[in-house]
Image (spheres, rainbow, N blue to C red):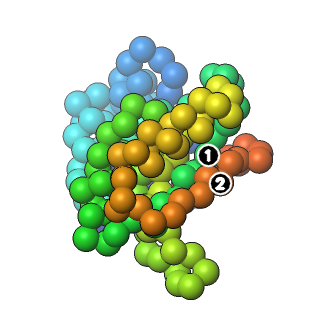
Amino acid sequence: MPDEIDRRLILATQAGLPLVPRPYHALAERLGIAAVEVEARLAALLAAGAIRRIGAVPNHYALGYRYNGMTVWDVEDEKVDALGAAVGALPFVTHCYRRPRHLPEWPYNLFAMVHGRDRAEAESHVATIAALLGTACRAHEVLYSSRILKKTGLRLSD
């Protein structure tokens, strides 16, 4: 169970880590604890599932990637885990996961986000995934982003 220091640490990091060369040290100073304790507490919160990950969230549009598409695939259930791992390992896939189908309207069970500087690049990525999935894939679609949405998780209040 998170204690008061964990709560303060979550509050201090939920909008992102400080953009400084040593973010754990900056957090430690702010919270009045040692940097090694910040690191240990974040590791414990990750292990307990209280926080899911620590990572960068790039703005793909600012980086020049204008064609961002969630690809959805109808993959044979007995092959989706292994094939999903292979798709997720592709260098142009930023996240990949399995989701339940909602038949008959939604037959797709594998989702993979791709990014391209132009439509041709994005479509090339989709073709690469399709080739990797081969005959285990019955259908797919690409759902291109039409606007930027703010990505945030659950937020604690003070």
Q: Is residue 44 above or below residue 128?
A: below
| Left or right, residue 35 beside residue 124 | left
Q: Callout 2, which amino acid?
A: Leu
Q: Is residue 21 above or below residue 47?
A: above
Given residues 33 and 116, the one toward you in this image is 116
Give the residue displayed 45% in from the left and 66% down from the top.
138
Type of amino acid at the residue the image marks with label 1: Gly
Q: Are marks 2 and 1 in contact (CB under 8 Å)?
A: yes
**Residue sticking out furthest to the front:** 135
In which quarter of the view is residue 88 placed?
Answer: top left
Q: Position of residue 110 (x, y in %)?
A: 43, 61
Q: Which residue does the image show at 61% across and 81% down from the upper left?
A: 105
Residue 81 on image: x %, y %: 27, 61
- Quadrant (top left, top right, bottom left, bottom right) of the N terminus: bottom left
Tell me, yes or no, if residue 75 can be seen here: yes
State which quarter of the image contains the C terminus. bottom right
Numbered circle sitting on residue 69: 1
Disc 2 element: strand
Residue 104, by quadrant, is bottom right
Spot occupied by residue 67 in the image (x, y as percentages of width and height): 67, 36
Q: Which residue: 61% across, 52% down?
A: 142
Q: Mark 2 Cα within 10 Å, few/some/many (few <14, many 20+)?
A: few
Is residue 86 left or right of 130 when viewed as pictured? left
Percent of width and height locating residue 92 = 46, 33
Residue labelled with disc 2: 143
Q: Label 2, label 1: how many angstroms apart (C-alpha)?
A: 5 Å
Residue at coordinates 32% horizontally, 72% vertically from top-left? 77
Taking 18 as reference, is 68 left or right?
right
Q: Say which mark, if any, is on residue 55.
A: none
Q: Is residue 52 visible?
A: no
Q: Residue furthest right?
A: 147
Tell me which numbered mark, 2 or 1, is placed earlier along the sequence: 1
